[in-house]
Image: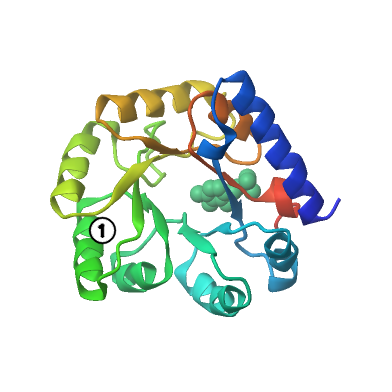
Amino acid sequence: MNSADQLGAIRARIAHTAKIARRDPADVTLIAVSKTQPEEAIRPLLAAGHRDFGENRVQEAQAKWPALRDAFPGVRLHLIGQLQSNKAADAVALADAIHAVDRPSLVTALARAMEAAARRPDCFLQVNIGEEPQKGGCAIADLPALLEQARGADLPVAGLMCIPPAGLEAAPYFALLSKIARDHGVTGLSMGMSDDFETAVMLGATHVRVGSALFGARA
Ligand SMILES: *Cc1c(COP(=O)(O)O)cnc(C)c1O
């Protein structure tokens, strides 16, 4: 199957799962994670009408997306990777949503960049849901302070984001993120990837980030 066929299949799986969970499929945004994919792989999805795409690296996105955006109006670009504070201005200029806001210095840098650019991409605060030392995301215990800082700095907080520990059942981690979001009055949940997006939709994901299931394995 090519990526446009896969798109239909994945949308159908999301719709089916949403129905079981008594949710409106329209409340789940499928982000096609196009990192490392060349333009030729992305164009069929754009031609099929898909508009939400995810990239990990600012530089790669800057190289790929201006031309694609000109050709296909309405693209929404989601930056989903770890973000260095010195890339905050570039990220704000480029992205419609930033999914890995995970520390006070980054909140400060993004707030400053948004003020300067008069542009306010949606922000998802990333939580290190499995408390893994090597992983991005703020500690669960640090989330309330980060959230307060982000709201105080006028960042448009759209939700929380997580990447559960590899090799473990993801559902408990999705459920935990969902509970933390509820406890703090946050509505969006960016969770679920190729191997577990249906589980994430069952547990309330509003944004699933799907790469390899759409495009095939990355080189
Ligand atoms: C690469 C990536 C994805 C997509 O992963 P797949 O397993 O290919 O679906 C989702 N989220 C983040 C943060 C990623 O870096």
Residue depicted at x 69% and y 41%: 11
Left or right of 11 in this view: 182: left
In this view, 185 is above or below 2: above
The residue tagged 1 is: 106
Which element type, helix, strand or loop, lies under badge 1?
helix
Left or right of 113 in this view: 14: right
Residue depicted at x 64% and y 26%: 17
**Color scheme of the displayed model:** rainbow
Left or right of 154 in this view: 85: right
Residue depicted at x 22% and y 64%: 109
Q: Position of residue 73 (x, y in %)?
A: 57, 70
The answer to whether residue 86 is seen in the rendering is yes
Of the residues shown, which amino acid type is indicated by label 1?
Leu
Query: Residue 146 versus residue 1: which sits nearer the camera?
Result: 1
In this view, 70 is above or below 213: below
Q: For residue 105, what is the image quadrant?
A: bottom left
The answer to whether residue 168 is seen in the rendering is no
Outermost residue toward the right?
Answer: 1
Q: Position of residue 119 (x, y in %)?
A: 30, 68
Q: How many marks?
A: 1
Q: Position of residue 186 (x, y in %)?
A: 30, 35
Quarter that holds the C terminus: bottom right
Query: Residue 65 versus residue 25: which sits nearer the camera?
Result: 25
Left or right of 57 in this view: 167: right
Q: Position of residue 140 (x, y in %)?
A: 29, 32
In this view, 19 is above or below 27: above
10 Å crowding of disc 1: few (<14), some (14-19), many (20+)? some
Q: For residue 38, what is the image quadrant?
A: bottom right
Query: Residue 11 versus residue 62: which sits nearer the camera?
Result: 11
Query: Residue 159 versus residue 105: which sits nearer the camera?
Result: 159
